Image (cartoon, coloured by chain):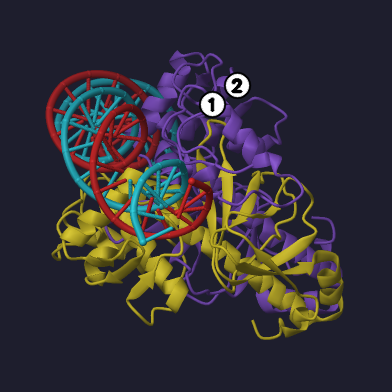
Chain colours: A purple, B yellow, C red, D cyan
Amino acid sequence: MHALQSLQALAVSIRCSRGQEICSSSRPAEYWYRVVSGSARRCVIRADGRRQIIDLLLPGDFFGFSERNEYDCDSTVEAVVEGTIVASYLRNRAEMMADTDPQLARELRHVAYKALSRTRAHLLLLGRVTAREKVGAFLLELIERCSGGATDTIKLPISRYDIADCLALSVETVCRSLTELKQRGVIALSGTRCVRIVDRQALEEGDSDSDASFARRKVASFHRGNSSADAKPVGPRAGRQLRHNGQANGFRQLTGT
Amino acid sequence: MHALQSLQALAVSIRCSRGQEICSSSRPAEYWYRVVSGSARRCVIRADGRRQIIDLLLPGDFFGFSERNEYDCDSTVEAVVEGTIVASYLRNRAEMMADTDPQLARELRHVAYKALSRTRAHLLLLGRVTAREKVGAFLLELIERCSGGATDTIKLPISRYDIADCLALSVETVCRSLTELKQRGVIALSGTRCVRIVDRQALEEGDSDSDASFARRKVASFHRGNSSADAKPVGPRAGRQLRHNGQANGFRQLTGT
DNA sequence: CGAGAGCTTGAATCCGGTCAAACTATGTGG
DNA sequence: CCACATAGTTTGACCGGATTCAAGCTCTCG
């Protein structure tokens, strides 16, 4: 984010109207992009017509690399809000530049790592069980990405439909989750797009009752670390697995260690 | 994958026992790794004790980069099978090497892109609706990654529990899905770990009835591409969205175009 | 002011999680 | 070599929660 300045020489700004397609994986990626203002979404349309949003792009986020790979999906990036501005960089030029500027090359690697982190965070979101958990965690992540955790209020950049397609839920379920969170006093809504976090703690757990009782309910039948950990983790800190085994007591306990 | 040869000079092989922790995000990543043989899984343990596998690592896959980032999760990579071999590369050495070898730098970028693609594919998997879809798509992806689509038979490298935690399902549901697929004649099982794809077509859809009737059922109520596409995709190929709108007929049709 | 996108709520259905129990495979110790 | 223990797998019954379908609402923009 610092030595990327050299890249800025190549930047060409594009102003996008709402819903406009910015790039699609159907043609060889000629450009890298960075969201300057507004927001964008990377979408996949399934054979059955459902849409899934696999990446939500906010100001500062890069996208468009990940050159055609084996298991790469047919995704499209669209601007979400009217007047979204993205900077585009001719890929060839950028790569040539990186060839002679090791620092830039490192930064570009870093950019890819950030995209990977973003995608992993998304993956964790989808792995959650209940809809309230998903929506709650999504709000927290969004507020974190938008304001760096500074505030507890956020203007949602996307619609309920987009949220639904982000979380692999139906719109109705997203709505219900939000109203439920509101009624429980976990969040507050001003209009439909403005959310304020009231009880951060409860939002992180997202679980049934909002008071503290983390694990110890919800304890049984899980196949956690142990599920096939039949070798004591030889490495330096074997304590990690155990911590989790300790706090959850269900079946399938660890044998060794 | 070709000019990475120069990197091989740094490689130090490690033999891992079953379940052994290879690296954890709790300490600054000193190494990059590559799976040589066997397999590994990147796991996250949630507060409630559930485990999620966010990356399945097969021979040839790199992991361990994605230096500490903002929204990075506390994950751990473990060997799945006894005798898994991973090559490790001292990160600093590798980066210094890349500084003087632009081709290597490009390859390293490519490695990150591959990890990103892998994670995206996983994201698509989790976004599927039914358990059968998830399991079916998972099998296809696995067979693709293992044999490059050459065969239609695969020896599952991981247990049902691992599959469950990959797909955010319960073990029981994974089992049921597999038996159901078997009974429908979509797959064949030899023992518990060996799967043969019989009806690839049906597996890709994963949907209720196995005969061809893709979209056109399952048509209503979806918020697909159009959901907030109020600007005609100005770009060169606006046909993309339309294709999908055409094949699905539900509400919320596109206004423009 | 009207139209349509976006949002919300309700009712019925169905799928997947949970709990329970049995079965198989594998490996270990007597 | 067999008995036993344990991990891994499978099947069944039940229940809760998410999707689906339906309808009404609000907000915005022309």
**Residue B253 visible within the image:** no
Q: Can residue A97 be seen here?
A: yes
Label 2 vs label 1: CA separation? 7 Å
Q: Which residue is mark 2?
A: A201
Q: Nearer the viewer, residue B220 or B239?
A: B220
- Secondary element type, mark 2: helix
Do callouts 2 and 1 mark residues in contact (Cβ within 8 Å)?
yes
Say which residue appears at 33% left-offset and 75% top-offset. Answer: B153
| Image quadrant where residue D20 sits | top left
* Location of residue B107 (image quadrant): bottom right
Question: Which residue appears at 54% of the width and 47% of the height?
Answer: A122
Viewer-proximal residue, B180 or B17?
B17
Chain containing mark 1: A
Seen at 84% across and 76% down, the residue is B97
Q: Where does residue A245 sit, x and y in percent of width and height?
A: 58, 34
Kind of residue indicated by mark 2 = Gln
Q: Which amino acid lies under the numbered mark 1 shown in the image of this protein?
A: Glu
Figure quadrant of the N terminus of chain A: bottom right
Question: Could you confirm whether marks 2 and 1 are on the same chain?
Answer: yes
B64 vs B70: above or below: below
Residue A205 marker? 1
Q: Residues within 10 Å of mark 2 (few under 14, many from 20)?
A: few
Residue D5, given in percent of the width and then of the height, sits at 45, 41
Helix, strand or loop for disc 1: helix
Q: Is residue B213 left or right of residue A116?
A: left
Residue D3 in percent (x, y) is at 36, 46
Q: In percent of the image, x 44 and y 25: which residue is there?
A: A178
Q: Residues within 10 Å of mark 1 (few under 14, many from 20)?
A: many
Residue B152 x %, y %? 32, 76
